[in-house]
Image (spheres, rainbow, N blue to C red):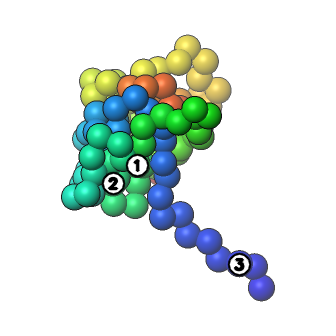
Amino acid sequence: MPMHMQLVAITLDCPDPLVLAAFYEQATGLELHPKSDADFAGRGCGPSARTASEVPQQLHICFKIEGDLEEAEARLLKLGAGKPDHQPHGDKARVLTDPVGHPFCIIRR
């Protein structure tokens, strides 16, 4: 029988965890963990941020969205996301970056 694994947290290195946490709070609606501070800021079952270490961590996050992909992209760009020129998924998804450069995708459900 295969082992069941459930994703419970994602941690991203960044210069200012509270600023990055605010971006993901606005983007996802997940509330800031009450013990968040300038060294580590957490979200409920979503991306968390910590002060960058000497060897930074990097990963790619994907979010499924309801509704129009272009509207979701526009909202995230207004919140501070970036959009790389290279978009490998055509009309199915968009690759964006959070305010400190971590890549993530938004995918239509």
Helix, strand or loop for disc 3:
loop
- Residue type at numbered disc 3: Met
Q: Is residue 22 left or right of residue 101?
A: left
109 or 97: nearer the viewer:
97
Residue at 33% across, 54% down: 43
Taking the view exactly as shown, the residue that stands out farthest to the right is: 1
| Residue picked out by circle 1 | 48
Mark 3 or mark 1, which is nearer the start of the sequence? 3
Picture residue at 59% right of the left edge, 23% below the top = 87
Looking at the figure, which quarter contains the N terminus? Answer: bottom right
Image marks 2 and 1: residues in contact by CB distance under 8 Å? yes
Q: Is residue 85 above or below residue 80?
A: above
Residue type marked 1: Ser
Q: Nearer the viewer, residue 68 or 54?
A: 54
Numbered disc 1: secondary structure: strand
- Mark on residue 43? 2
Residue 6 is situated, as x and y percent measured from the top left of the image, at 55, 69
- Considering only order in the chain, which callout, 1 or 2, is on the residue closer to the N terminus? 2
- Do callouts 2 and 3 mark residues in contact (Cβ within 8 Å)? no
Q: Nearer the viewer, residue 56 or 3?
A: 56
For the residue marked with disc 2, what is the amino acid? Arg
Q: Which mark is residue 83?
A: none
Task: Tell me the tag on residue 3.
Answer: 3
Q: Is residue 44 visible?
A: yes
Q: Earlier in the sequence, mark 2 or mark 3?
A: 3
Nearer the viewer's eye, disc 2 or disc 3? 2
For the view shown, which residue lies furthest in the top direction? 85
Q: Position of residue 35 (x, y in %)?
A: 25, 57
Of helix, strand and loop, which one carries label 2? Answer: loop
What is the distance, in whole Å, between disc 2 and disc 3 at their CAs?
A: 26 Å
The x, y position of residue 72, in whole percent, is 35, 35
